[in-house]
Image: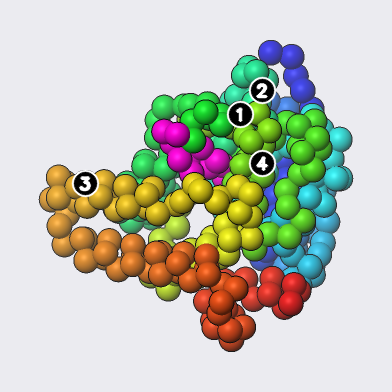
């Protein structure tokens, strides 16, 4: 495989030890990285030493109220002339030195592939049930998804995650990139546009990062509210491809897994987590009917609403 130019793009907010570990592991990748472009929110939280210790790093600072899931990543993409853009989040850690190479292979080895996303493995502190959720959403088998898969995979056809995903820059520019404003879910919105234009999304199970969260019910509610909003704002992707079926499938599979492994005391927690997710998603899909005060109490992104009133 001939070497293509790669830039890694990372939005960051109050980066700490974990972020430094990410820079360290990216710098040790076998596949050469051209630049690590960091879009850092609030300059006061940035350590200048990182630019000295990791020469690949190029940092651009922005104010908190300027950050947008779509616009910030669009701006970073405009700064890059690389053939492949790899987007990551500051809390994702490459599992090995092959991550970037495997993502690149997933795009260049598959005709029509516009994006490839990595497998997310649970971190050491990941709770038991969340470990199962990781394996449900990120199985050990790779796959290629195109528009014909909507009949069988439903909304999962458009699934892609900027926790760690690579994009063909030419196709990205052709389609106009991420949405200019996005409360959340900019990766899936773009993947939906891409698939509808005849391109493919590759799930590259051999490209692995450690990434997981132990969200509370309240956090799940806020997160899924914003997810619902993002889908309501982009009916051209999500209309007629409901998410509820996939959610129900996860709950059923999780329940069976808890019974099978003898962890039945975790079932009430599964119920409350699932109810919180659905309540947030249900309200988010109908945000246009809600008063502003209620929206601001439901969202995890108040600046988004203040900016786009």
- In magenta, the rendered stretch is 151-161
* Rendered position, 95 above or below 218: above
Do the numbered discs 2 and 3 sit on residues whose CB atoms are within 8 Å? no
Which numbered disc flags the more N-terminal residue, 4 or 1?
A: 4
Instruction: Examine the residues drawn in magenta and state their main secondary structure.
Output: helix
What residue is disc 1 on?
Answer: 200
Gap between marks 4 and 3 measured at Cα:
34 Å
Gap between marks 1 and 3 measured at Cα:
31 Å
Do the numbered discs 4 and 3 sit on residues whose CB atoms are within 8 Å? no
Mark 4 vs mark 3: give the one in front: 4
Residue at the spot 83% in from the left edge and 56% down from the top edge: 60
Mark 4 vs mark 1: give the one in front: 4
The image quarter in which residue 231 lies: bottom right
- The label on residue 112 is 2
Residue at the outermost bottom position = 293
Give the camera-side residue of 31 and 39.
39
Which numbered disc flags the more N-terminal residue, 1 or 2?
A: 2
Which numbered disc flags the more N-terminal residue, 2 or 4?
A: 2
What residue is disc 3 on?
Answer: 257
Do the numbered discs 1 and 2 sit on residues whose CB atoms are within 8 Å? yes
Residue 203 point in image, percent of width and height: 52, 32
Which numbered disc flags the more N-terminal residue, 4 or 3?
A: 4
Q: Residues within 10 Å of mark 1 (few under 14, many from 20)?
A: many
Looking at the rendering, in which quadrant would you find the C terminus? bottom right
- The label on residue 208 is none
């Amino acid at each position: 495989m001939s070497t293509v130019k790669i830039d890694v793009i990372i939005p960051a907010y109050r980066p700490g030890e974990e972020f430094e570990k990410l820079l360290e592991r990216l710098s040790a990748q076998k596949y050469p990285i051209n630049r690590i472009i960091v879009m850092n929110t609030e300059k006061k939280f940035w350590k200048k030493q990182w630019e000295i210790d990791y020469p690949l790093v190029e940092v651009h600072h922005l104010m908190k109220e300027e950050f947008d899931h779509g616009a910030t990543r669009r701006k970073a993409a405009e700064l890059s002339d690389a053939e492949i853009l790899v987007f990551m989040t500051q809390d994702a850690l490459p599992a090995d030195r092959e991550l970037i190479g495997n993502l690149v292979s997933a795009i260049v080895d598959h005709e029509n592939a516009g994006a490839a996303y990595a497998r997310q493995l649970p971190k050491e502190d990941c709770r038991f049930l969340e470990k199962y959720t990781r394996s449900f959403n990120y199985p050990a088998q790779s796959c290629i998804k195109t528009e014909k898969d909507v009949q069988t995979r439903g909304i999962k056809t458009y699934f892609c995650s900027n926790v760690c995903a690579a994009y063909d820059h030419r196709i990205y520019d052709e389609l106009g990139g991420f949405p200019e404003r996005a409360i959340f879910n900019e990766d899936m919105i773009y993947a939906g546009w891409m698939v509808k234009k005849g391109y493919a999304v590759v799930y590259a199970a051999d490209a692995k990062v450690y990434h997981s969260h132990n969200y509370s019910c309240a956090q799940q509610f806020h997160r899924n509210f914003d997810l619902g909003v993002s889908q309501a704002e982009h009916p051209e992707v999500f209309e007629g491809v409901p998410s509820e079926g996939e959610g129900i499938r996860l709950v059923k599979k999780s329940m069976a897994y808890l019974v099978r492994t003898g962890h039945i005391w975790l079932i009430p927690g599964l119920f409350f987590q699932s109810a919180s997710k659905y309540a947030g998603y249900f309200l988010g899909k109908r945000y246009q009917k809600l008063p502003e005060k209620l929206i601001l109490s439901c969202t995890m992104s108040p600046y988004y609403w203040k900016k786009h009133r």
